[in-house]
Image (cartoon, helix red, strand yellow):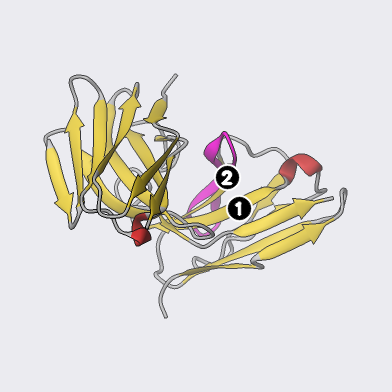
Amino acid sequence: DAGITQSPRYKITETGRQVTLMCHQTWSHSYMFWYRQDLGHGLRLIYYSAAADITDKGEVPDGYVVSRSKTENFPLTLESATRSQTSVYFCASSEYGASDSPLHFGNGTRLTVT
Amino acid sequence: KNQVEQSPQSLIILEGKNCTLQCNYTVSPFSNLRWYKQDTGRGPVSLTIMTFSENTKSNGRYTATLDADTKQSSLHITASQLSDSASYICVVTSRGEGGGADGLTFGKGTHLIIQP
C-alpha cells in the first residue's frame, strides 16, 4: 500500500545512546520532514529535505542528524540521546513542498529516553 | 514573529451537536491556511486548505471559513459524531519564507471530545 511508514512505533532508550528512527514513503514525494510533538508546543520542525542528498535544518535541529541517500527514505538519528528528546516524532512528506501541497504524516514514533 | 493561536484548547460536546473551533494568526505575508485532524496515536491528516481569496469551504460535515482582513479562521463541525473526537490543528503558510518548510506556523491544536 502506498503511504508513509515509521519504525519503530515505540522506543525506549537510555541517556547517551544513539538511536535511529526510520521513515519510508512510497509516493516518490520530493520533500520529507521530521517533526517532534510535545505537550504545550505543538509540532516543531527538526529537519527537512527537498530531494535526495539535500537536507536543511528546521526550528530545533540540535542533537539530531539526518541523511537522505534515497528519495524514499529519511532516517533521523539522535547521536547521544537526552531526556529532553523524549517526545513523539513524526515524519511527513509532500509533493511540492509544505507551502504548496499538504503534508502526509506517518503515525509517529513515541521515544522515551530514561 | 509569526504566531498561530487556537481556541479553545479543549472542548467536550455531546454527539449530534455542532461546534466551532477558532484559529487566529499573525503570519505575514499570508499564503494559505490548512486545517489538520489528528486522531489519537496517529499522524495529522489534512482536512482543507483556505487561500486568500476563499471565504468558505466545505468538506462533508466540516466547514472552514477565512477572514483575511481580521486574520481569523474557523472550523465548524455539524452534527458531530464519535469519530470526530481528535485534535484539530491550524497551520498557516507564509509565502517566501524558505525552501518549502520554514514557512509553516503550527497552532497547538484544539482537543475535541465527543461524548455519546
Q: Is residue B22 left or right of residue B53?
A: right
Q: Residue at x 69, y 64 (%)?
A: A10
Which of the two labelled residues, at mark 1 and mark 2, occupies the earlier sequence position? Answer: 2
Please check the rendered image and state whether residue A3 is part of the magenta-colored stretch, yes or no: no
Q: Which residues are magenta?
A: A38-55
The secondary element bearing badge 1 is classed as: strand
Tell me if residue A110 comes above or below residue B51 in the rendering: below
Q: Are marks 1 and 2 on the same chain?
A: yes
Q: Position of residue B107 (x, y in %)?
A: 43, 34
Q: Position of residue B31 (x, y in %)?
A: 26, 34
Tell me if residue B5 comes above or below residue B113 in the rendering: above
The secondary element bearing badge 2 is classed as: strand
Q: Are marks 1 and 2 in contact (CB under 8 Å)?
A: yes
Q: Chain of mark 1?
A: A
Depth check: give the residue in front, A7 or A66. A7
Depth check: give the residue in front, B111 or B5. B111
- Label 1 – label 2 distance at C-alpha: 6 Å
For the stretch drawn in magenta, what is the main secondary structure? strand
Residue A89, disc: 1
